[in-house]
Image (tube, grey):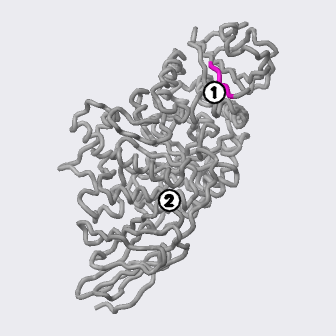
Amino acid sequence: MITRSKVFLIGCLLNSLALAVQGQSIELNKVEPPNWWVGMEDSSLQLLVYGKNISLTKPSIDYYGVEIKSVTTLESANYLFVDLEISPDTKPGSFDLNFSKRNKQILTYKYHLNIKSDRPANGQTVDGSDVLYLITPDRFANGDSVNDSTDDTLESANRSDLDGRHGGDIKGIADHLDYIERLGVTTLWLNPFLENDQPKYSYHGYGISDFYKTDSRYGSNNDFKNLAESCHKKGLKIIMDQVFNHCGAGHWWMNDLPAADWLNQWDSFTRSSFTNIAASDPHASRADYDLFTKGWFDINLPDLNLSNKFLATYLIQNSIWWIEFAKLDGIRMDTYPYPDKYVMSDWVNRITTEYPDFYIVAETWESKASSLSYWNRKNANKDGYEPHINSVCDYPLYYAMLSAFGTEGNTYKLYETLAEDFVYGDASNNKVFNGNHDVPRLYTLLGENLAKVKLSMAFTLTTRGIPQLYYGDEILIAGDKPDGNLRKDFPGGWKSDDRNAFSKEERASEENELYEYINAILAWRKDAKEIHFGKLIHFQPLNNVYVYFRYADNEKTMVIINNSHESLNRYGLARFQEELLGYTSATDIITGRYHETLDHIDMEANTALILKLKK
């Protein structure tokens, strides 16, 4: 028999404890969330407690303001779900969460309650004044080579493997915050950095094996928290990429599920149809809906069943935990239409209850505005569903950009796509992008044509919405399928690299030309209120020339995109007089050139003018 002893576990550093009680070993391995905060708008908290035969124990707490409301056991004897009520006048501090058997205390977890952060009410935490910069952490920069391979993870670093771990980490990002700040973006978004303990192809981050732990190959939870603090000191914001649709096959609970319905399970492996419209289609069959929402992404990405209310609560609390722990400015939710959409709506409501102006952007891979609008509405859809989400990924506009700026493309595609903005609840909150981690590189898609890339950048950064750039696109990184080519290492992020593209001196001339072009727009954009929150007026493109205006109060900017192969000599502006009325001159914000008249203008082929109008 194991000698009985009272063991106190301090904080989150939990050792597995075992005690033989009448021949049955009882262990305590995890309590999640590992800590919480007082002052929450929602006073409820559900603890997931995991350990061998832990369901044979009875939990108790003796702390003023904290009360156990219920204790639930599911199918596995190794889980307890403990529902707490934390009263508004509860003081921060620590208490013992005790576990007893036959009225004898056998295990204890020291639980901490901190004070909820006091966030100023300055409006939406990320908005049209911001520009997001998306990074795949494994491929940006290696700041600490010691953690390239770690003892607690399966896959070791192998930079020669296109789909392997390359060693990028949180320190590498922190080491290059000056580069990110100088570029002119305002907000950092990282692909998932949580533990992905898979035997291979884990660098992308979307096969999470522990929702409360930073992957040790990237660093620690505190490393991420420190990165967020460093961003905030520089005036940068930070967004966390979260995943509710699936976890990794290596997740710690996969060998011992709390209940069979923790996952969407089939008789044999069944892949999702990936047909997003099935979630909004009023005529969808049940079979099609289930295949889309319950099919697995891959055999190594088990599909989570959010209809299980305990799992739903677990994931919702996990989001809140990370918001508080790292003082997040936003969340990007992966594969938003795939999980139970009603639970996702509840998730948004729970977060905005705690943080009313918190920014949440949903990955909604829809090619048509009509389908995308199902998720971006101020009121309920016709089927009664209210998504409550405040930003969506504007794939219709992304595809329109590729069409417009591709070989022999026409800007009419931009015009007709934006003309459908009436279907959205708030199109100005759509996240606008010309590249991300899931699609071929912009430079490749536009035929490695620098002029077309510049047109795409000018449009992305001046149209309505919240713009997002993908790391390396500013220096013309190329790449197509397979995935590893889309997420290439940033040159200079590794000490062994032949050159350092973080440095102007080591970039090629075309790389610097694009970098400086983007930098000039971003420097001006930071104070351009009409771009941040202004309205958009556009004119039907003629001869592949697209003209639009952004205006707010007394500020107005005119954008002319000459997407044709012909230069414009003395291009007349009389057609646009309704928007030019009262303005007499303009300054080109990229070159600084002053235009003393608005009667006509000269433009080279395949160029854009961003003109700040003057009265």
Judge left or right: residue 275 versus residue 243.
Answer: left
Looking at the image, how many numbered discs can be counted on the residues? 2
If you read the primary sequence from the N terminus, does the residue marked by circle 1 or circle 2 appear first?
A: 2
Label 1 vs label 2: CA separation? Answer: 42 Å
Q: What residue type is labelled 2?
A: Glu
Q: What element carries label 1?
A: helix
**Is 192 a magenta residue?**
no
Frontmost residue, 571 versus 166: 571
Placement of 151 over or under 280, stated as above or below: below
Instruction: Give coordinates of residue 343: x percent, y percent.
Output: 36, 49
Residue lying furthest left in this view? 267
Judge left or right: residue 268 versus residue 254.
Answer: left
Q: What residue type is labelled 1?
A: Ala
**Visible in this render: residue 512?**
no
Q: Which quarter of the figure is the C terminus placed in?
A: top right
Q: Are the residues tagged 1 and 2 within 8 Å (C-beta)? A: no
Frontmost residue, 218 versus 372: 372
Q: Is mark 2 on a helix, strand or loop?
A: loop
Instruction: Give coordinates of residue 188: x percent, y percent.
Output: 59, 47
Residue interval drawn in magenta: 548-552
Instruction: Give coordinates of residue 7: x percent, y percent.
Output: 42, 86
Instruction: Give coordinates of residue 465: x percent, y percent.
Output: 57, 33
Judge left or right: residue 159 versus residue 24.
Answer: right
Frontmost residue, 27 versus 378: 378
Residue hosting label 2: 41
What is the magenta segment's predominant secondary structure? strand
**Residue at the (30%, 61%) spot, across then down:** 254
**Residue at the (27%, 44%) spot, across then down:** 295
Residue hosting label 1: 458
Frontmost residue, 265 versus 95: 95
**Residue at the (73%, 14%) spot, across then down:** 581
